[in-house]
Amino acid sequence: MHYIGLDWGTAKIGIAIGSDETKFASPILTLSYHSLSEIIEKLSELIISEQAEAFVIGHPISLAGEAKREQSFHTFVKEIESLGLPVYFEDERLSTKYAASLAREFKGSKKVSDDEVAAAAILQTYFDKK
């Protein structure tokens, strides 16, 4: 099964891809956006090009008490769910240290953003637990 990993932010989103066959996540891009429709359009393209069958989204547990950001996250999730693929969540707090080690690995091979690396860490953490 092929997955798209997402590290959500209010202005940009890190995106990674991976497969549970290889159990390896790879950062692919950071998408700056102004509307959810921009995200949905790009993810629709990625579903086709990467033959994705599910999403793994980093869940920002630390949003408790931040009503506006929490509402934005839930609105984002509803839009992702509208694409019709299963959506799984991974506690992104557990991915922070892992993202730092991945950053060293990926930054040597190509230019990647912290958001992409965070998305890869979220997806890799999900694979490692399976």
Image: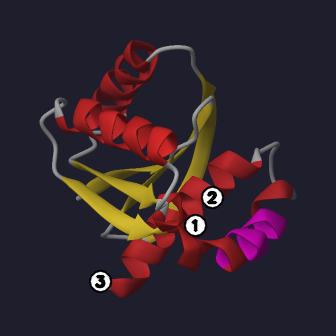
Horizontal arrangement in the rendering, residue 50 relative to residue 61 (left or right): left
- Residue at left offset 16%, top offset 51%: 86
Magenta stretch, overall SS: helix
Quarter-of-image position of residue 28 = top right
- Confirm whether the magenta stretch covers residue 103: yes
Quarter-of-image position of residue 50 = top left
Q: Are marks 2 and 3 in contact (CB under 8 Å)?
A: no
Task: Name the residue tied to disc 2.
Answer: 118
- Identified by mark 3, the residue type is Lys
Residue 85's spot in the image, x, y percent?
A: 16, 43
- Identified by mark 2, the residue type is Ala
Is residue 77 placed above or below 27 in the rendered structure?
above
Label 3: how many Cα within 10 Å (few below 14, some 14–19, many 20+): few
Report the residue that reaches farthest toward the left. 84
Q: Are marks 2 and 1 in contact (CB under 8 Å)?
A: yes
Colour scheme used in the picture? secondary structure
Q: Secondary structure at mark 1?
A: helix
- Identified by mark 1, the residue type is Ala
**Quadrant the C terminus occupies:** bottom left
Is residue 34 placed above or below 31 in the rendered structure?
above
The residue nearer to you, when weighing 71 against 1, is: 71
Label 1: how many Cα within 10 Å (few below 14, some 14–19, many 20+): many
Is residue 31 placed above or below 123 in the rendered structure?
above
Q: Which residues are magenta?
A: 98-105
Task: Name the residue tied to disc 3.
Answer: 130
Task: Name the residue tied to disc 1.
Answer: 121
